[in-house]
Image: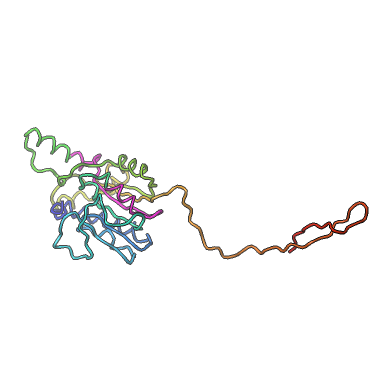
Amino acid sequence: MQDWFDTPPGRYLLDWEHRQFEQAVADIFGYHALQLGLPALDALQANRMPHRWLATCEPMPLVQRPPVLLTDFSALPFPAASLDLVALPHTLDSHPDPHATLREVARVLVPEGRVVLCGFNPASLWGLRQWRDQFCRRRGWGWGEPFLPALPQQIGYRRLRDWLHLLDFEIEAGHFGCYLPAVRTEKWLHRLDGMDRLGARWWPIFGGVYFLVAVKRVHGVRLLGARWKTAPSRAAAAVPLANRSGDNHGLTLNRKTD
């Protein structure tokens, strides 16, 4: 997958996704942020949290952005409710167990923490080209190499939203991008760049990739503000009560006075 992002369509995709992550994470505040996978894209570059990590599933000797964690995405080395932001650039596309990865992300996020992710859209020109190439290769018809990198599976936009809702995430923002046809050369990418504007207007849900921001909601948890004022205490004073016979000795009422 890393090699594919060095191709012209891969660089075109990374450029679009880099802008989306910059806008999404710039105003997310907290202390701890984590990116899972895809070192070619610095998804946390625009974020200002003091502690940021990049996690990979395999050694990446060329990565120059420490600290780098080598871990399984479905078993992260963080305690529960310890991270404020998790970025998943094509992480669910490339992991063999994306649902377990998403459950682990839900575990390590604090209440009101955010997950920002992107993935390939199967319902797009790129997705259809990938399906056609794989179908023909299985039948031995030889249509050449698949357009997209080899992925365990492609997760649809609606399917992913259902997974997030089941894990008590609330979708905060979501949109699509990269509407160019599945062409491989820089020349044709420049010739067809006007389709990005047309696609965003006329067929917005058929972009090559989708981008999502979701917030972790925890039912029954309420954030409390500072208690600046304390209600003044009231002193109790004894008030005599007269009876019918005029004898008011020994009978009193407690009346609260300011």
Percent of width and height locating residue 238? 79, 61
Percent of width and height locating residue 84? 36, 58
In this view, the residue farthest toward the top is 139
The mark total stands at 0
Percent of width and height locating residue 169? 38, 47
In this view, the residue farthest toward the right is 245
Which contiguous range is marked in magenta?
101-128
Residue at (47% x, 48% y) in the render: 220
| Left or right relative to 203: residue 233 | right
Seen from the viewer's position, the closer of residues 183 and 151 is 151
Residue at (32% x, 42% y) in the render: 163
Residue at (17% x, 44% y) in the render: 151
Percent of width and height locating residue 74? 25, 49
Q: Is 159 a magenta residue?
A: no
Q: Is 109 a magenta residue?
A: yes
Seen from the viewer's position, the closer of residues 177 and 47 is 47
Q: Quadrant of residue 133?
A: top left
| Left or right relative to 190: residue 114 | right
Q: How is the image coloured?
A: rainbow
> Quarter holding the C terminus?
bottom right
Residue at (31% x, 47% y) in the render: 103
